[in-house]
Image (cartoon, grey):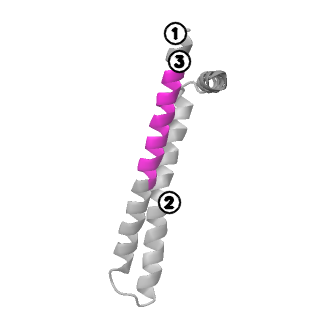
Amino acid sequence: MKEQELVEVEKKAERMARSRRRRSSPWRDLAHAGTLGLLLVGPTVAGAAIGHGLARGGAGRHAALIGLFVGLVIGAALVVLRVRQSLRSERDDEAAREEEGGT
């Protein structure tokens, strides 16, 4: 039982330390928005380029549009995953702050 309590205390201490390190700032928010933009635009442009190459190679007239759509879907999925990860991290930080204030 004591080992389990020790593990819980270590986890709380780690969350509190991480919370202290992560303070919100405009620069951090700007970097986060830029990252999300790149996660969306990168796969979209890559998909369009691949589709365009396939269309020029004789794969069909709509290959560029299909590539664009596939890239957009992949980019959107990456953005959703990154936002979920960020929200999960913020929730953990808030829980650590509440624990810190409560003790």
Secondary structure under tag 1 reads: helix
* Furthest residue in direction front, as rendered: 1
| Mark pair 1, 3: CA separation | 8 Å
Quadrant of the snapshot with the C terminus: top right
Q: Is residue 59 above or below residue 81?
A: below
Q: Callout 2, which amino acid? A: Gly
What residue is disc 2 on? 42
- The relative height of residue 28 versus residue 61 in the rendered view (above or below) is above
Residue at image location 39% in from the left, 68% down from the top: 70
Q: Which of marks 2 and 3 is nearer the N terminus?
A: 2
Q: What residue type is labelled 1?
A: Gly
Q: Identify residue for label 1.
A: 102
2 or 3: mark nearer the eye: 3
Q: Quadrant of the N terminus?
A: top right
Q: Where is residue 72 in the image (x, y as percent from the top left)?
A: 39, 62
Question: In the rendered structure, does residue 95 fall within the stretch colored magenta?
Answer: yes
Q: Disc 1 to disc 2, how far (Cα)? A: 44 Å
Q: How crowded is mark 1: few (under 14 residues within 10 Å), some or many (20 or more)?
A: few
Of residues 95 and 55, which is closer to you in this image?
95
Q: Name the residue under label 3.
A: 97
- How far from the left and from the top, in percent, is residue 31? 54, 39
Q: Examine the structure image and report whether residue 18 is included in the region drawn in magenta.
A: no
What is the magenta range?
78-97
Give 17 or 80, whichever is nearer the viewer: 17
